[in-house]
Image (cartoon, helix red, strand yellow):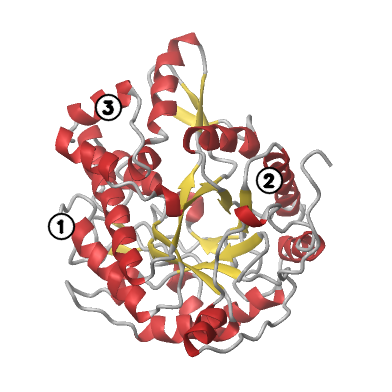
Amino acid sequence: MYNGFIFATGIENSIPTIENGRVRMDEMEKCGHYRYWRTDFDLVEQLGIRALRYGAPLHLAWPGPGKYDWSFADETFRDLRRRNIVAMADLCHFGVPDWIGNFQNPDFPAEFAKYARAFAERYHWVQVYTPVNEMQICALFSAMYGWWNEQLASDFAFVTAIKNIVKANILAMREILKVRPDALFVQSESSEYFHPENPAAIAQSEFRNARRFLSLDLNYGRRVDSEVYEYLLDNGMTREEYHFFLDNCLKHQCIMGNDYYMTNEHHVRADGATYASGEIFGYAVITHQYYNRYRLPVMHTETNLMEGPGGDEAVRWLRMEWANVLRVRNNGVPIVGFTWYSLIDQVDWDVALRENRGTVNPLGLFDLQRKIRAVGTAYRDLIRDWCEVLPTQSICLRVPIVLPLDDECAAAGVAAPRPDIGQPSSQATAAPTNTE
């Protein structure tokens, strides 16, 4: 059993389409992962990391209804299993196969659930899942801002996308649980806040601050705020559809993942337009807002910052985010993990994947030549320094993650080997109390 605080990273498998579906922005291809995946897994181990946010490229693995191509996933997931790395399976990351079309397709939820079950049956040792990554952001960028996939820009299109996306997430969880009853689900979602620029912007800010919870409210079966409820009904959601979410809550097997970047806070003008505010409240304050709403264990599932001319910008951001994690923890919130996202540099995220420029963004722990960045060294050292003093404080709160080799050995009825790669065992040093 994995008994420690979860230090993680990820290899991004975003696949949105742009230019009316003619261009697919495949981050694994852009970043060279299809060629260097073995090297990338070596790098994960070099950092002392036991958990990796990782998924098969959905558009390649799912070429048609009921049709699957597991050739790449077989190689990669079996190698992760051999290395005893916990794969946090990222099944749908900002895009769907061409035959689905986009997130306006009402068939997407049921079809995706079939894919999720087929995946779980094939890779039975995978226990931790993010069925659909950043559901709110996916719907906003695809159907409200007109940037990706359906490239629509209306409230009606957004509501259609969000109800299909969240329903797909719920149905996928349900199917995975039929195969793996002890499955755990991490809802990696952007944690946002909207600040009014002036008194005339207060109403707009309040609505946006209510709507930011929409994907998680629906996923966790929580009644939305009254203004948001009217907004949903006004833009195509039926009462029956709304009650589906209230009646299909799997919250008890979920960890709330909060993503936080420099761009997660916004100023709002009187006309409703927004622009980035930079960090004002910060991760700790905003995460408390989300925790107070859902009362679930928390994991910081994404953050990064570009390495700038000084070379230490990302390192300073890492230390600031880690300080926020400790603040959240010491205030009594059950926070169970932290993630620098991603392992290697990304491409074209400076324009939110809206244009196929090929611009390398120095956001990773390693560059695209697989050379460690300063933030990679800092993260490796942070893991080494903190892993022995940050097991989850109470055994009752430990995340019940079964390591891949433990799962294999349990099935065979033998004891599992326990390689020492720098994270705590069940004999880890007891953590200090919050007051200490």
Residue 332, x across and y down, in percent: 67, 39
Closer to the chain start, of discs 2 and 1, is 1
Secondary structure at numbered mark 3: helix
Mark 1: few/some/many CA within 10 Å (<14, 14-19, 20+): few
Secondary structure at numbered mark 2: helix
Quarter occupied by residue 107: bottom left
Please report the residue visible at 40 percent of the width from the left and 27 percent of the height from the top: 210
Left/right of residue 237 with respect to residue 386 in the rendered view:
left
Mark 2: few/some/many CA within 10 Å (<14, 14-19, 20+): many
- Please, what is the three-letter code of the amino acid marked with disc 2? Val
- Residue 404 to residue 95: above or below: below
Please report the residue visible at 53 percent of the width from the left and 62 percent of the height from the top: 346
Q: Which residue is mark 2?
A: 325
Q: Which residue is mark 3?
A: 229
- Please, what is the three-letter code of the amino acid marked with disc 1? Asp
Closer to the chain start, of discs 1 and 3, is 1
Any mark on residue 40, and which? none
Mark 3: few/some/many CA within 10 Å (<14, 14-19, 20+): some
Closer to the chain start, of discs 2 and 3, is 3
Secondary structure at numbered mark 1: loop
Quarter occupied by residue 280: top right
Separation (CA) of disc 2 from disc 3: 33 Å
Residue 237, x across and y down, in percent: 18, 35
- Residue 64 to residue 170: above or below: below
Q: Which residue is mark 1?
A: 107
- Please, what is the three-letter code of the amino acid marked with disc 3? Tyr
- Residue 224 to residue 128: above or below: above
Q: Residue furthest right?
A: 436
